[in-house]
Each structure stands twice: as structure tokens, then as C-alpha cells.
Amino acid sequence: TEIEPKKASRLPWKNKTYDVNVIEEKKKTESVSFKELFRFAKKTDVFYMILATCAAICHGAALPLLLLIFGNLVDTFTDRSFNLCTLNLTALSLTYCPSGIILTSTNFLSLYKLCNFTGSNFTVPTFDLTGKVRQQALILVGIGCGAIIFAYIQIAFWCVSAERQTRAIREAAFRAIMNKEILYFDTHKTALIFSKLTSSMTAHELKAYGKAGAVAEEVFSSIRTVFSYNGVEHEQTRYERHLDAARDFGIKKGAFNGVTLGFVWFVIFCAYALGFWYGAKLVRDEGFNIGSVLIVFFAILIAVFSLGQGAPHLQSLAQARGAAYYVWDLIDSPSKIISNSVSGLKTPDLVGIIEFSEVNFVYPTRPNTSILNGLSFDAKSGQTVALVGSSGCGKSTCIQLLQRFYDPISGSVSIDGHSVSEYNLHWLRQHIGVVSQEPILFAATIKENIKYGKDNVTDSDIEDAAKKANAHDFIMTLPDRYETMVGERGAQLSGGQKQRIAIARALIRNPKILLLDEATSALDNESEKIVQDALDKASKGRTTLVIAHRLSTIRNANKIVVIHEGTTVEEGDHETLMNKRGNYYALVQAQNLQIAEENEEDEDEDIYPDEINVRQQRRSTVASLSPSMLATIHEAKIADNDGEKNVKKPSPSWTMLKMNSPEWLYIVFGCIACICNGGIQPAYGVILSKLIAVFQECDRDVQEHNVLVYILLFIGFGVLMLISMFLQSYLFACSGEKLTKRLRAKVFRVMLRQDMAYFDDPKNNTGALCTRLAVEASAVQGATGIRIGIMLQNFASLGVGIILGFVYGWALTLMLLGFIPLIVIGGFLQSKLVSGFASKDKRALEDAGKVAVEAIQNIRTVAQLTKEERFGNEYAHLVEIPYSVFNCVVFGAQSVGQTASLVPDYSKATESASNILDLFARKPNIDNGSTDGEQIANFNGGIEFDGVYFVYPNRPEAIVLRNLKLKIMPGQKIALVGGSGCGKSTTVQLLERFYDVVAGRLLLDSKDVRSLNLQWYRSQIGIVSQEPILFDVSIKENIAYGDNSREVPMSEIIEASKNANIHSFIEKLPMGYDTNCGSKGTQLSGGQKQRIAIARALVRNPKILLLDEATSALDQESENVVQEALDRAQQNRTSITIAHRLSTIQNADLICVIRHGRVVESGRHSELLAKQGYYFKLAQKKLK
């Protein structure tokens, strides 16, 4: 995306409102209806839900049926007592019983055998107690068996249906994202989109954690930039700021839940009191049976209590309806440009005639900034048309409009006489090949990346495409060749190698239209001519649009269109435009090109054919190293592996408790509250039994007194439950939320301390790290917080219940204790099953997260390659795996009791804690958070590579640097040149200490860099990389990022911007320095991003300046000014420049030619030309 600021008044369509196709939030309740919540339920799911609901009704009926049996049993035990109230038991006791024994209605059955009723007319009532109890007990067993069956059906089928629908929702949401127009991604952050796919939190938590996740995603995907500018603490602070908001909301939610639950229990106990008072009145005055009273009373209480228990689930349902509103909106919101539409024109033979007619365009995110202003040009079938102009003039916008990433405001963009909006978009993009300025590769093998260009191709087709792009030879030198993993965004390859893979990917689809946006900008001179020849051949028979700052690459174009401020100002071939001596002539003169018409190809000989032919080169592999060096590399590899497992990992459960130790006071008082809650339940059982006994009391006054006592006890229990429930929920919310915040922050910090090898590992790409950070740190709370409280509460209930049981009836207690092992065994088996599948579930969701983040981050490339469906299928396959795992768990384990229901959370927590411990135990070879090491007092900037050998940790078989020897004096300007992949950029990464050398030494002012303080060391270095990474913050903040050790004054930011030739551009923007750069700087052109990156490097005033193709993306108009600024910036500081354009390094103090990881030539420009060696041959190609 390009920005070329102009005054709004110049817009010819200034009175027209641009429809940005953004759906505004309505002023209504943001939730869906209950019916809409199940819109993704298929017939099978509906059947499952109906079956589960019927089972739930039957399961729910078990408790009321239990009440009937309970009431009958109470009547069975109390019937004889009521009959005895008709007798004068006091007189009988005095007459027939031993002294001291007074019979009452409550003790008669246990004491009457001690009395001698011989001679009296009293007959002890006969009662078949055992028979009646046995009958009721058998009914209880039947109810229990039915409850097991129906509970299993209820839980299993509801869960399976829910998981099936969740999988469908994830898949639909991801496919919807893949088919959104580009505008959607301009206005939504990647991590916030990703969080909608992964999160199940409340809206407030989702918002807070989503912002934190956005920071994490941006940091992990830009990790080299963060390390280079010592941004770890800055990013840590930014991340924790959002975590604080989520923590505070979680604590408030805990307090609210505590008050709500406590109040519910208070009302329940008050209902007990009122019910028993009135029940006693009914028994005394109305002749009701005790059993009937208890059945009515408990039936109503159970109904109320069930509603209370259902309240949290109703809350979950409300949250689900609210969350569904946003997800459904994501899925349903219409796009003006629909990539997967089946409608649209599909012509039998696309010819490739392109026409831009009076095209006006502004980016929807910047409606007041004109980009194209009546632009018109055409390209005939088979023609090569080049677009040239200053950075930000609108060239790349033409490429985006042609692919229909956006629609123009007015005018038309047509192919073969039809507007691009008339075509089937998927079909159209399949006929367009694109090679962009910054090539995007996916985290897959080289073969798979080339295959992204076209499905159903053979290995032979892939190799042919690679050969045409001059990529085959370097691929064959890699240990795994075409199966080599390129890393996230192609991080394992050099810029030139990535570009050639991207060219091969475009060529393999044999497109009718080829779009080349600086396709050779990243290539060295040796490769550029061969690739340019390949592109020239590939352009034959197809229409080609070329954007190039290097005008030498487009001299042979059929037509050259010069664009200025979004308008065509010149048009014609090279010779015609040169004769006009207008804008194009000025650009050519500025680039100092030879414009003679002689055929350079005839005059130039090949550059050392034996050096270009890699098959004849001595391969840079371990095979060519000495045994001693092999041993050194092997030991280094072992040491690297040991870094991950050299610390013994403690128990996850114990570690989780230690993690929560700062909140010990909250936990202690929370545990006390839990014990109170747990103890009240069995104590209530004792009071209930006493209250039932009260009904057997024949003396009315005694009965009324005892009823009053127990009623007051019930009210007291209600008050105690209100207080303890609040304290339990609030205190454990404080404990759990603070743990989660601290743990997330610590995991983030530890991740940022890891060395670059950790981030190079495909298992640790951005998507995986973001998923791990979001899921695992929160999952640990599954074994802490309120769940610990519930477990303690249940254990307290069990403990107090057993104690009271032994007090009142040890024999019956012993018998009932026999059931406890069954519950424990069931919970243990479920724990093993759940934890066994937890890790596989986690890995599958991580993999799905990788796919989602990678696709969303690189949506333009996905759209160009028309691979939305492929990524959708891949994501769907990965979310299928946890669904399969879930089925195994559901059908392989039954939850037993409330404590057992916590096992899944606890299992996930222990699994997550184990993974976090693995991370904490990993000792990186380079600790990016370390403050140890010495600082050089008077640092001059001297650098020395002393016999350096280097291999990348994840590719130990390929030697990159081989005995590199290079000494750089303080203040010296050094240039490194050589073939793509020869090791130039590796030297920059070693200087930044992203990696350590395998053998040899890297010295600064004669000090080994490994002994220096890493933060101080990096603060002495400024870097401008080949592909600059900007953050999704303002221009001002991006420039100030150059020095994170202080608040950079605005005056210094402006001064750095002026030196980088970007100040005047920024001032013309509507928001000036407060303009947001967009994710990865997408709101700026390549040249604009590069200049902001240069300003960022200059603001820290470094002693060492590293320029890795710092001006490669600039047009000639800007390059000269920026180069002058860089020349000034290099004064009095050591600088190392990596350049493929030799014209930018002619004034270097020393030029070193690197081949096979070692210096093969060095000297000044004139000296190397005089040698007529390798550098001379390179210069012949490009220098005047």
C-alpha cells in the first residue's frame, strides 16, 4: 500500500463518500438469539442434542424420585414414634422399667427391651421395618442405575454435539476470514482476528487479552528487530499493561460471583428455616406426615436450588450468545470483493490486454489522501509494460487494483475489455502471476512453497520452474534440497534466495499476466542477470507489468509509463522517452546508466562459469571440513540440545503451588472459607436429622422450643455461607488472576530471553507461541484459584461428614466408606485418560494456530495465489484432530462427582505447567534478557572476525562461514559483496549476536563479544535491514523505537527523519508523525518504510552502523539524498554495508568479496578493479 499525500481539495471526487464496506455496530444488544446460537448444528447434532436433552430430563427426575423414597423412609422410621405418643410412657417407665430409665417416644425402640412388661396389658407394637426399608432400598438402586445411564448419555452426546459445532464454527470463521477483502485486514489486527478463533472468554477479558495477544504476535513475528533495538523491556511493559486490565476485570468478576452465590445460599438456608417452622406447624396442627412435609419442602428447595445451580450456566449461555454475535458477524458480514464467489466471467481464452482508464483511487483507511488521480495507460497482449516513478507515486497500487484487492473510486481497470469486477475473482487471480518486492514464503518446504503457485504439478515441473528462476543450483546444495524447511516467512533463506523461490512460484503457474513488483531487487549482480533473462523469457507470450527502481532492468520494455502523483506524465519506449529528455530522462541520468545501444550481452563474457555452476563448486557442507572442526561443530550442536534439557524439571503440581506463593495470604483465608463452606454441608445433615427427631417429640412446648433453636441455626448457617462464599470466590479470584497475569508476563519474558535458534525452530513459530502464551498460562489457573477452593470444600465436606458419621454411627459409616474408593478410582481413571490426550489436543490446536496466523499475516500472498481454500482445508483438518481426541475422552471416561468434574481442568493445568517448566528450564546459549557482562568504557568500534566458522543451529550440515577472517578498524567503512547466500547477511546476524560463532572468535575492540553485556553491546549498533519491520504504532513511536533506553525527544525524531529524507513526506500526512504505520508497515510503500527504518537507526547515534541493502527499495530520486545522509551518518563510526548494487559502495574504505563463507578478495574499489578478479567481473555488469 502506498501513500502519496496531497491536499484534500485536489481530489476530483471530493464530494463523493467512499463506501469502506465496514458494518457499524448497531445500538442494540450485541447478542444472537437462542435459536441462532445453534445455526451450525447439522441433523446429526440436532439428534444428539434431542437425545441428550431427553436423557437430561430423565437424569434430572432422579433427584425428585429420590425425595419420594426419602419421604417414605422417614415415615417408616417415624410412624411407630407417633403411635407411642398416645401412651403414658412416664407411668410405664416408673412401673416396669429399672430405676433411672425413662422411656420417651424418641428412645423407646432402643430401651424398651430393658423393661419388664410382664403382667401389664401393654403390647409392644409390631412393625416390619426391615421389609419396608429393603423395598425402598431396591427402588433407590434402580434410580441410581438409571441415573448413571442417563447422565452418561446426557453428558456424552451434548459434549460431542458441542465439539462438532465448535469445530464447524472455527472452520467457518477461518474460511470467512480467508475470503474477506483486503480492506478488512487493513482495519483489523492479525492477533485480534486470531483471538476470535481461539478464545472462549467473556467480552471484557477477550478485549483485554486480545490486545495483549496483538502485542505478542507483533513481537514474535518481528523478533530480530526487537532484539536489535533492545526492545524487550519496552515490549514487556506494553504487554503487561493489557494484562493488568484483564486481571482487574477477573477480580471484579470473582467478587460479583461470590456475592451472588453467597446470597443464593443465604436465601436457601432462610428457606430451610421458614419451611421447617411451617412444616412443624402442619405436623402438629394439621396432622401431616413428616415424610409428606419433607417431600414438599425439599422438592421446592431442589427446584430453587437447581435454578441457582443453573445460573452460572445461564451466564455461560449469555456469554456464548454475546461471543456468537461477533463471530457470526465475522462470518456473515458481506464483502464488496468476494474471492470465493462462483459467479463472474470466465473467458475461454484470456488474451491479457490491460487498460487503466481515468482511474481515481484512495485507500479506504486514508480517504483524504489521493493515490491515483485520473491514471490512464494500457498494455497490449504479450507486451512488457514498465511503471516507473518516485516512491509512493502509485505504482504498486496499480498492481493491487489489477488483482482486485480494491476497487477504484472512479474510472475502470479492465482486462480484455471487461472490468476486473466482472470476472470470477478466483479464476482471474489464477491467471495472474505475482512476484512482490518483499516475497512472502510460508513455513513449509521449498517444494511446497513453489507448489503453492499451482496444484497438481510434478517434481519435474517444480525443478524446471526453479531452474528458470536460477534457484535450482542453490537448492541442490542444501542438505535436504527441495525438502528444506524455509522457516517462518522464509527466515532460513537469504533475501535473494527467497526472491528466486517466489519467482519460481509465479512461473510454475504459467500465467497469462505477469506482475513483477521489484522482482529482482534482492538479487546480487551475479544472479540478477540470469534471473532477469529468465523473466524476459517468461514474459514472452504473456502480458507483463514491471515495477522497477533500477531502470536498467526495464530498458527493453515495449512501453515505459512514467507516473507522477498518481497521473501518467510520460509514455513510450526507452529510446522515445530518452529523446524527450523529460522525467524519464532525468531519472536515467540520476542513475548514471550507460544508455548506449550496444548489446551488453554480446560484449560481456560469463562470470567465471565454474563459479556460477554450483555443481562444480566445492560444496559448503560438513564433508569438506577437517575432523577437528567436525568435532567442534558436533560439540556445539550437543551443547545446543542440552540447553533444552540440562535442568531437572520439578513436579508440575508442586510448581503450580509455588507459582501462587506470593498470594499465600489470599490462599490461606480462601482455604479457611472453603473449609467453612465444606463443613456446613454435613453439619446441616446433622441438624436435619435432629429436626426430624424433634417431630417425634410428644411434648408440644419442648418441640416448639427445639424447632426454634434449629431454625436459628439454619439462619446462622445462611449468614456464614454468605460471608464464606464471598470470601472464597473473591480471595481465590485475586489469587488466580494475579497468578495468571504474573505467569503470562513471565512466560512472555522467558520467551523473549531465548536465543534465535529457539525462534528458528518451526515448532516455535509466531502462531504456536501466541497459542501457547494464551492457552497454557491461563490453563494453569485450572489447578489454582476457585478450583482449589471447590476441591478443598469437597474434601472438607467429606472429612467433616466422616467424623460426624463415626460420632453418630460408626458401623453405618464404615459401610458407606466402602463407596469412596469407587469414586476415587473413577476420578483417577478419568484423570489419566484426560491427561493422556491433553498434549495431543494441545499440539493439534497449536498447529491450527500456526496455519491461522500465517495465513492471516500473509493474506495478500494467499489471495494472489488463490490458496484461500487450501489454507481453509488445512485448518479444518487440524481442528478435526482435537475433536477426535475429545471423542476418545468422552466415550472412554465418566465423570464422578463434583471433584471429578474438575479433573479435565486440573489435567490441562498440569500439562500446561509441565510445558511452561520445559520453557523455564531451557537455558539459551544467548540470554537476550541478560544484563551480565562487561561494558567497554571508551568503545571505538573496532571489529574482527578471527577464523570464524558458523552453522545455523537447525541446519548443522550446511556450513555458512568457513574460517572467515576480517579486521575492521574503528571508523572504517566496509562493504561486503558476493553471491546470494554466500554469508554476507550472516555476518550481520553474528554482529547483532543473534547467534554465536561455532569456532573462532568475533571481537569488538579486541574483546570477545560473548564476554560483553548484551544490552550495552546492541545499543552500540544501528541496523537497517533488507526487509524493514515496522510496528503497528505511529511513525513517531517507530522512529523512537531506535533507542528504548530513554524517552526520545521529538526534536531528535525530526532530525533523524530529515537525515533519512522522510520528514517532508511525514509532514504532509493528515496525522503527521502520529500516523499509524499499519501491521508490518502495510500503510506505507517499500521506500517509505525503508526511510523510516533508516531514521530509526540514526536516532540512537550508534558507534557501528549495519546497512543490509538499506537503499534497495528506494527510487533514484530518493536514493541519492538518502545515500548522502547515510554517507554523513557513517562519519566517525564503523559501518558495514551489504549491497548488491555496487554503485552504492564505490566510496567504501574496504570492499570484501565473500565466497563460500570466506573473504576471497579485499581492497578499495579501484584496487579491486585493477586486479581484474571476481569484483571486476561484477563491476563490468553494473558500473559505468
Image (tube, rainbow, N blue to C red):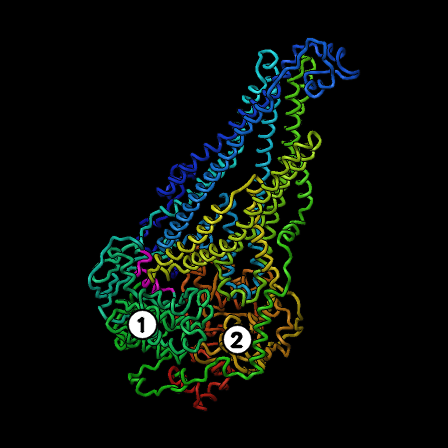
The residue where tag 2 is placed is 951
Q: Within the magenta stretch, is there residue 399?
A: yes
User: What is the x, y in percent for residue 474?
Assistant: 41, 77
Q: Is residue 611 above or below residue 401?
A: below
Mark in front: 1 vs 2: 1
Q: In this view, does 764 lie above or below 117?
A: below
Q: In this view, does 948 lie to the left or right of 936?
A: left
Q: Distance between the residues labelled 1 and 2?
A: 31 Å
The residue at the far top in this view is 121
Segment tinted magenta in the rendering: 392-406
Mark identifier at residue 461: 1
Nearest the viewer among 129 and 824 is: 129
Q: In this view, does 21 lie above or below 967?
A: above
Q: Can residue 36 be seen in this view?
A: yes
User: What is the x, y in percent for residue 924?
Assistant: 59, 66
User: What is the x, y in percent for residue 420?
Assistant: 26, 58
Instruction: Identify the secondary structure beneath mark 2.
Output: strand
Query: Which corner quadrant holds the C terminus?
Result: bottom left
Q: Which residue is drawn at 57% across and 22% down?
A: 294
**Quarter of the view holding residue 290:** top right
Q: What residue type is labelled 1?
A: Asp
Q: What residue type is labelled 2?
A: Val
